[in-house]
Image (cartoon, grey):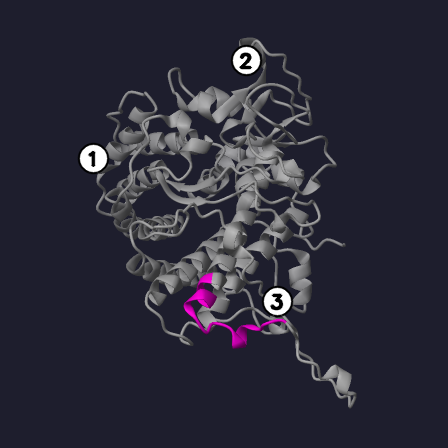
Amino acid sequence: MKMKINTIKNRIIFTLIAAFAISCSDDFVDVQSENEDSANFFNSEEDYQDALVAAYDPLQSTYINVMLGEIAGDNTVAGGEGIIEEKGIRDVDFFELTEVNPELRNLWNWMFNGVNRANYIMQYQDKTDFPGKEEVIAQARFLRAYYYFELVKFFGDVPLVIDKPLEFGDQYEVDRTPKEEVYDQIEVDLMFAAENLPPTQAQTGRITSGAANALLGKAYLYQNQFEEAATALEKVVNGPYMLVEDYASIFEPEGENGPGSVFEIQYTDKEGGSFNCFPCSEGNIAVGYSGIRGYIGPIYDEGFGFNLPTQDLVEAYSAGDIRKDVTILDIEALAAETDEEIEYEEGFQHTGFYNKKYLPRKGDLNIPDANLTNPNNYRAIRYADVLLMAAEANYKKPSANEEKARKYLNMVRERADLDPVTLSGNDLLEQIYEDRRLELAGEGHRFFDLVRTGRASEVLGELGFQENKHKLFPIPLIEIELAGNRWNNNPGYIPQNN
């Protein structure tokens, strides 16, 4: 069964309740809540499974992580209607980052929501036994690691709380934890997950041992622990995955959860969405945001015109690279080659190009608000990504293996209809970097690849990137204030007035 998360997520809703001691003799205040609290939950396998689905659900909020990972880099610009619309996204594009950026505050809140839901399960992991519970715990630990990896990737040092949820009042005691310790916990969680999860799942969308090892290898790569990264990633290279021969099919509906998908975030168009609650939407909001403004024509539905590919990205593809036409939609070329009349609006920073991998396609249910309910899954970890990470890790590890690095790189290139390379030394490494950009463009990795490899200043300096400031994003001001102003922000960020 396809795991479109919303189909079972509403079987349980967790509510954080702050308990206050109230001195009052009136009987009416001593009324037991009708809501089931977590202390009286977790009495059966079904309870644990319901809680696990609730922990999966915030994955769908990572749409903003994906958009910002491209817009902060050189692959795309913010776009949209104008400089005022979604100013938080535009400010990321121009590196005009402040502590009151609403997109960063949402990202912080939504990822910690995921951490909390996973920690609810971990808090009661020993309460009830049933066959297969280790696998439930393993999925919860992967999810906690995934959310923390997103947090540390954006913000560096973040509060680390394990096996209990963050509750009201904890902010006065919990400090930002050094990112090295956060990574340590991520590694421990992912190693447990890898050891206790199967290589395949009966329910599509559930986490596998391959996903755990892939994310573990990625976490090592972000810490320049290349020997460990290579070891973890080799397990995935040797797993039940393959490069899909038809690259163009990967990002179409029929390409969802294919043999090249190591971990895929599930979306659906079977529920409506509202601008009053983005985390409530079960559709991929990034798709509607990336759609063509005012579009009338074949194949695609309209959207808001954000996340527009740059001319620089277009020109980076060599002749014959089939990835270009799968990644980038040239709106003028589409208008010229179709017999149907096409209409569209040119928005802010219009480049003429759109992120074709994640454009709204015709044929979905278009349940209101249609721009928030696109069913396109996000391919969070693809086999090609794993091969390129493994190529980099094998090149950079102390016991370097250039032969294996070339092999993995060429597997990806040959699928793109490109000639294999015979490069060595730094030329090989630079080609690995270049093919990461071209293979994964539009998928949210570019900015973080530039930062972790020390190339951000060189590539993004003319766009406003400052080495001593922008490698991390600012901690939201409200979080610092809620912690009693005990936390310092990341270097370079001056407190802003609300």
318 inside magenta stretch: no
Residue 306: horizontal and vertical position, in percent? 62, 32
Q: Which residue is mark 3?
A: 15
Q: Are marks 3 and 2 in contact (CB under 8 Å)?
A: no
Residue 466: horizontal and vertical position, in percent? 57, 42
39 inside magenta stretch: yes
Check disc 3 and give the amino acid type: Thr
User: In the picture shown, does residue 310 fall above or below 385?
Assistant: above
In the picture, the quarter occupied by the C terminus is: bottom right
Q: Nearer the viewer, residue 29 or 152?
A: 29
Q: Which residue is mark 2?
A: 333
| Residue at (39% x, 21% y) in the render | 322
Around disc 2, counting alpha carbons within 10 Å, would you say few (fewer than 14), some (14 to 19), or many (20 or more)?
few
Q: CA distance from mark 3 to mark 2?
A: 51 Å
User: In the picture shown, does residue 216 fall above or below 345?
Assistant: below
Q: Which residue is mark 1?
A: 403
Residue 312 is tagged as: none
Q: CA distance from mark 2 to mark 1?
A: 40 Å
| Residue at (38% x, 50% y) in the render | 203
Residue 239: horizontal and vertical position, in percent? 25, 45
Mark 2 and mark 1 lie on one chain; the one further toward the N terminus is 2
